Amino acid sequence: MIEERGRVLSVEEGAVWVETVRSSTCGNCAAKAGCGQALLARVGSGARRGFIRALTDRSWQIGDEVFIGIPEDAVVRGALWVYLTPLLGLFAAALLAQALEAAEPMVILAAVSGLIAGFAVVRWHGQQAQRDPRLMPQVLRSAGQMMPFVQEGRLDG
């Protein structure tokens, strides 16, 4: 389970909106200097707020600090869909055009068409997967403390 700590911003039936602070993991990596993530962290985009809708069956209050999570296999399957499907479309269309002895410009056009078709399949699959609660973030547990509400640099108690 991939977990992230966050703060409840809004409560709705069966779900909460959670604010997380995405930060770079460069403090734990041995390749600090040669990584694009480290560069982004240095220019100020390494820690950004994220707003995530997470499913829950418990009652939460605004300001509660919680841990949300998503199964690791959902992330891996999602990455495989996003990266492999367009590539498979590209190669399948190009190989088919080549097997039909098409001219090189037609093979290239077929490859681009296969890539676009692969992206369309990924988009369709993503729309279908949005309805699957097993792939959505879930509130796992309380982080055990309440955080004050911070808005635009002010601390409102």
Image (cartoon, helix red, strand yellow):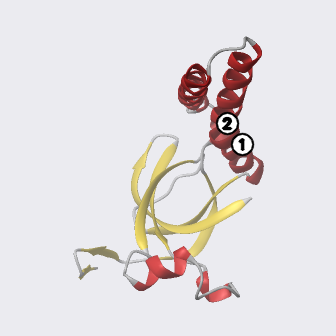
Residue 85, given in percent of the width and then of the height, sits at 67, 33
Residue 74, given in percent of the width and then of the height, sits at 71, 45
Question: Secondary structure beneath disc 1?
Answer: helix
Where does label 1 land, which residue? 80
Which quadrant of the figure has residue 51?
Answer: bottom left
- In the rendered structure, the answer to whether residue 150 lies left or right of residue 54 reads left
47 above or below 95?
A: below
State the quadrant of the C terminus.
bottom left
Where does label 2 land, which residue? 87
Which residue is drawn at the image coordinates 69% and 61% (left, top)?
2
Which residue is drawn at the image coordinates 61% and 27% (left, top)?
111
101 vs 80, nearest the viewer: 101
136 vs 8, nearest the viewer: 136
- In the rendered structure, the answer to whether residue 58 lies left or right of residue 94 reads left
- Farthest residue toward the top? 100
State the quadrant of the N terminus.
bottom right
Calculate the distance from the C-alpha at mark 1 to the C-alpha at mark 2.
10 Å
